[in-house]
Image: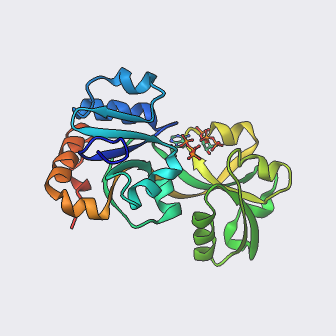
Amino acid sequence: MKNGLKNGLTFALPKGTLFPDTVRLLYKAGFLKTEEVLLESRKLVINDGPYTFIICRPTDIPTFVEHGAADLGIVGKDVIEEQRREIFELLDLKYGKCHFAVAAPKDNPKVHDLGKLTEVRAASKFPEVTRRFFKGLGVRAEVIKMHGNVELAPLVGLADVIVDLVSTGRTLRENNLIEITKIMDITARLVANRVAARVYDREIKAIVKKFKSVVGGEKNEVNLK
Ligand SMILES: Nc1ncnc2c1ncn2[C@@H]1O[C@H](COP(=O)(O)OP(=O)(O)OP(=O)(O)O)[C@@H](O)[C@H]1O
Ligand SMILES: O=P(O)(O)OC[C@H]1O[C@H](OP(=O)(O)OP(=O)(O)O)[C@H](O)[C@@H]1O
C-alpha cells in the first residue's frame, strides 16, 4: 500500500465535463464493476478490482501523472497543450469533443481579421496556447489569464478577443461573440507517467488495447518506448 492506495496501477480521472463519459468508458472496457459506484460517489480514492482510481480536478491530472502519483490519467488535449508536461500521450479517446478557437464580439469588426492586426489583447484560461498561437501569427499579444467565464472579458472591455473551448457554440452565440479562427480540435486523451510506461509496458499496452476496442481507431497507437 502507498498512502492508503492499493497496489496495482492508479488511474487519475477528471471530475466535471469528462467524468460521465470516462466512467462509461472504464465500465465498457471492463475496468470498473459498476458505473453507478463512481457516478454517485463523493469518494476521491476508489479501489475497484486490480486498479485504484483517484478523482482529480481536470487541470491537476498532468501533475498527478508527471509525478507518478498516478500511473495513468484521462485528460483533455487542451490541458495537455497548455501544460506540455513530461508525460506520454497514449490514445485519443474520442469523447469530450470541442475545439480551441479565437472569438470576438460580433460588433467589433476591427479584430475580425487577425492577419491585419499588429497587436491584440486576449483573455483565456489557456495563456500558453494563446501566446503560442499569436506568436505563430506574428501578432504581439497581451494575454490576460482567466479562470472561467472567459466570454465576459471582451463584453466589458477587458480584452479584444478570447481564446477558449467551443463545443456547440451556444456560449458564444448567447454572448454576441463570433468565432474568428479555429486553432485545434480537442478530445480526451489517455496519458501515462513516463517511468510507469516503461516499467508496466505490457500491462499498459493491454489497457490501451482494451480502450481501443471500445473507442475504435487502430491509427491511434502510440509507441510507449
Ligand atoms: N463545452 C465542452 N464540450 C466538450 N468538452 C469540453 C467542454 N468544455 C470543456 N471540455 C473538456 O472537458 C475538460 C474539463 O472541463 P471542465 O469544465 O469539466 O473542467 P475545468 O473547470 O476546465 O477544470 P478545472 O476544474 O481543473 O479548472 C476540458 O479540459 C475539455 O477537454
Ligand atoms: O460551445 P459551448 O457548447 O457553449 O461550450 C463552450 C463553453 O464550455 C466551456 O466552459 P465550461 O462549461 O467548462 O465553463 P468555464 O467557463 O468555467 O470554463 C468553455 O470554456 C465555454 O465557455
Q: Position of residue 60 (x, y in %)?
A: 50, 51
Residue at x-position 13% and y-position 55%: 202
Q: Is residue 213 left or right of residue 60?
A: left
Would residue 113 appear left or right of 79 to someone viewing this image? right
Asked if 96 appears above or below 190 in the picture, the reply is above
Relative side of 44 to 27, left or right: right
Which residue is painted at 19% across and 61% down in the image? 199
Residue 116 to residue 208: above or below: below
The x, y position of residue 111, in whole percent, is 76, 62
Q: In the picture provided, is 14 more to the left or to the right than 27?
A: right
Whether residue 46 is situated above or below residue 102 in the rendered picture? above
Quarter of the picture holding the N terminus? top left
Quadrant containing the C terminus is: bottom left
Instruction: Return the x and y of residue 106 as percentages of the image width and height.
Output: 76, 49
Q: Is residue 188 visible?
A: no
Residue 41 in percent (x, y) is at: 44, 25
Which picture quadrant has residue 119? bottom right
Query: Where is ligand 2, by quadrant?
Result: top right
Q: As displayed, is residue 137 above or below residue 182?
A: below
Q: Which of 103 and 56 lies nearest the eye of the viewer?
A: 56
